[in-house]
Image (spheres, rainbow, N blue to C red):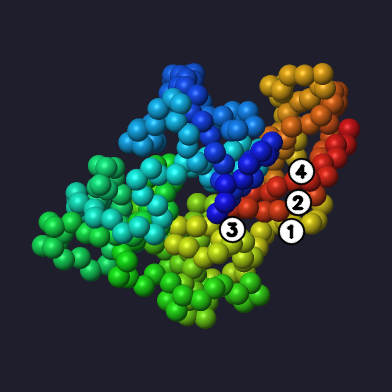
Amino acid sequence: MAVQENHQVLLEGNYYRFRILHEIAMPPDDEPYYVLETESGIRHLLLKSFYRHYQFAPGMEIRCKVDKVNCSGKIFLEPDHPFCKPGDLLHFNFTSDVKILNSIGIEEDLLLLADPWGQPAHLQVQDVDYAKLKEGIVCRVDRIKKGKLLISDPLRNYFGKGGVPVENLPFTITGICSLAPNLEFYILEQNQNIHYLRTKYFSQYGFGVGDQIHARVLGEAALYQHYLEPVHPDYKPGEAYYFDVVRTEKSSVSGDTPSYILVIKDVLGHEYSLEQQGDEPPWIARVRAVVKEIRMSKCIFQEISIEG
């Protein structure tokens, strides 16, 4: 993907160039962060602890992907790994095996490996020849997140026939698998093709093994990529709904135009902090908002109106 230049607003999925200005310790724990700046002068923070093995230093220019923009507008950056990229085949050393209990009570086996830079990585396994593991194992890098390599066995068929998902056909939940600790997925089958859906974002939907669900297709299929959005049990994109007001907060934005933070809550209990222009109303009864989009079970809003 081409690098995007001179944007005041960083867009999810796009890549941007940054210069590392310096490091800063942030309260309350004095965690060290890199201070990054785009060519147009926009500054962002990047937690150093995830990327110590990247050998970053002030003055360096790096490229980052906007990995996610959450419902409150917070931007999460993922810098390019300086030594490898998705799709590469790398040699990993075997460290130990790990047994975990997934959310439906089934025990799963994972291998704990070490990448070429000594960082931990997990591999979801079926049949293992432990005698051969002493020599290490070659794995494919599927995704890089928070500096960690998410990997798979290049000889294993994870996707069935490998076809793309069809939006107007149901998906059947055939099981659950963990690709790493705390990285659990529903296994979805459709037309003998396998797809994956993170369980943690949809735990309140009441899904179970054997259920048929409908989902919108939001992107290309990849083992460690969110590209399906199940139909929300309560909200539909393009429709307007009323939301409970939790509280208001003082805005950190300074300038001539007054603003405040409005915190609202949806029926699943998700809270949203929305920046509102103008003076804070003395009393707010409820909020009406149009749901523009739903991502990972959370709403993205537009056309917000406040009723006193």
Q: Is residue 8 visible?
A: yes
Q: Which residue in the protein does label 4 denote?
A: 243
Dot placed on the residue nearer the N-terminal end, 4 or 3? 3
Q: Residue at x 45, y 44 (%)?
A: 80
Q: Secondary structure at mark 4?
A: strand
Between 271 and 130, the one lying in front of the other is: 130
Q: How far apart, in angstroms, are the residues tagged by discs 2 and 1?
A: 7 Å
Dot placed on the residue nearer the N-terminal end, 3 or 2? 3
Q: Residue at x 56, y 72 (%)?
A: 165
Q: Secondary structure at mark 1?
A: loop
Mark 1 vs mark 3, foreground winner is: 1
Between 190 and 99, the one lying in front of the other is: 190
Dot placed on the residue nearer the N-terminal end, 2 or 1? 1
> Percent position (x, y) of residue 77?
52, 40
- Numbered mark located on residue 205 in the image: 3
Between 284 and 62, the one lying in front of the other is: 62
Q: Is residue 42 above or below residue 204?
A: above
Query: Mark 1 and mark 2 in contact (Cβ < 8 Å)?
Result: yes
Mark 4 vs mark 1, foreground winner is: 1
Q: Which residue in the protein does label 1 denote?
A: 236
- Left or right of 203, for residue 279: right
